[in-house]
Amino acid sequence: MNMTPGREDLDELLDASSPPTTPITAEVAAEISRLRSVTLPAPGRRGPRRWARPVGVTLAAVALLGGAASAAAATGLWTVPWAPAALTSFTYTLPSGAQCEQIIGNVTGSDPAQVEAVEYVYRSTDFDALLTDEAIAATITQRRAAGPGLYQNADGSTAPSGYGTTHYNADEEYSTAVYDIVVTAVYDELSSRGIEIGSDVSYQSQWNCPGADW
Amino acid sequence: MTGEPDAQIQLIAALDRNSPDVLRYLERRLGPEDAADALADVMMTAWRRATSLPNQDEQARMWLFGIARNMVANAERGHRRRSNLTERLRGALATAHGAGRPADEGLEIRDAIARLSPDQAELVRLVHWEGFTVAEAGAILDIPASTARTRYQRARADLKATLTNASVGERRR
């Protein structure tokens, strides 16, 4: 191989030196599109959007302080391995009458001090005391005032979602408001301590709402 | 910069246009195993900062690559956790993997690039692998265009010397 490059030769060599990557097949493209949809946050939420109709026990890594959570199995059993060591749990009742219990835990991140700070705030906050009917109603009012969100159709097109649209679910609106209150409380507490959380800090959440109308 | 509803619509378009290239970038830097999770992190960060999305297409592309660049830097500092969110994309990548060029093609040049200083090396990669201009690559790396040009020229000179020496060594064997 002649490796004494002139200017144009060097450009060609450098251009051609990129490591081979996986071809973007139709399947890969479809999965990229799906990933874009499932990371889309609901209005007012800092983290990624929850699945439109959560099933199974899939959990998502959560950037910053936002959260993607999932429905636990209808059997009422926690299915995540970290459940026994969950940092916190709280309960609430959905508009459908279903009782929910939600747990949060498994905080990870590259900075141990940040992980510890998030864990501490979750452990030390009384979320049941924060989740009053008034607080939840106020959060729902704020979210409705912020206007509709975006619903992604299977073909990639979008439509308005939320209260007053065809893509509205009262149970989901309520549980999202609950989660907003929790996330906002933790975010505000960390901010008041002057703690800036990096984008790679994540935690997981799982909820159990037997009979919910998702 | 745009308001939140407009920003979300514009970000959907920006992600549609650029996600395949961002995925390729992440795959080149982190490998196929971690690229899907890193892409999810890029998207989540992008959504969170959607109101900062530039209006111009090329600026938006650079903005996304800037987020991706930070993800790569974070990933290099720590182990990336697998997310169930990206399980299907990882599977699709694994299925499609191997249909491209041979993995060792260009290996000697990549080795030469890797021997540059980290800043120079990434500048060269952004220009020649991702197709950015030197000034754009500098913006992604958060360095002035004039600094980027100087570093790039120095990197080219170093690469030329390295590759020439390799060639001389090869002929002498």
Image: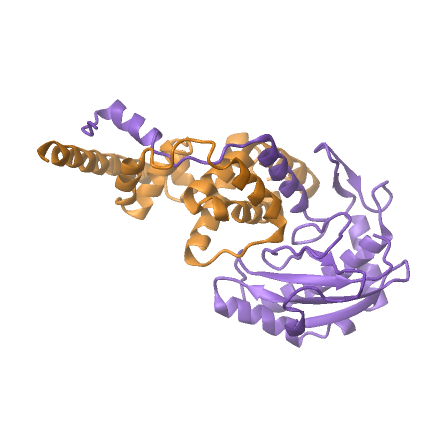
* Chain whose colour in the figure is orange: B
Q: Image check: B37 left or right of A182?
A: left
Outermost residue to the left: B172
B17 to A80, vertically: above or below: above
Quadrant in which the C terminus of chain B appears? top left
Point out the residue furthest to the top here.
Answer: A8
For the N terminus of chain B, the quadrant is: top right
Location of residue A46 with respect to A15 vertically, above or below: below
Question: Residue at horizontal 60%, vertical 47%?
Answer: B86
Measured from the top left, where is residue A11 in percent x and y? Answer: 30, 27
Mark yes or no: residue A138 visible.
yes
| Residue at position x 17%, y 36% in the image | B166
| Chain letter for the purple part | A
Say which of A129 and B126 sits in front: B126
Q: Is residue A191 visible?
A: no
Q: Position of residue B140 (x, y in %)?
A: 43, 41
Q: How is the model colour-coded?
A: by chain
A23 relative to A177 in the view: left or right:
left
Which residue is depicted at the point 68% across and 66% down?
A: A185
Residue A25, given in percent of the width and then of the height, sits at: 56, 31
> Residue B172, image x and y in percent?
9, 34
Q: Is residue A164 left or right of residue A190?
A: right
Closer to the camera, B30 or B74? Answer: B30
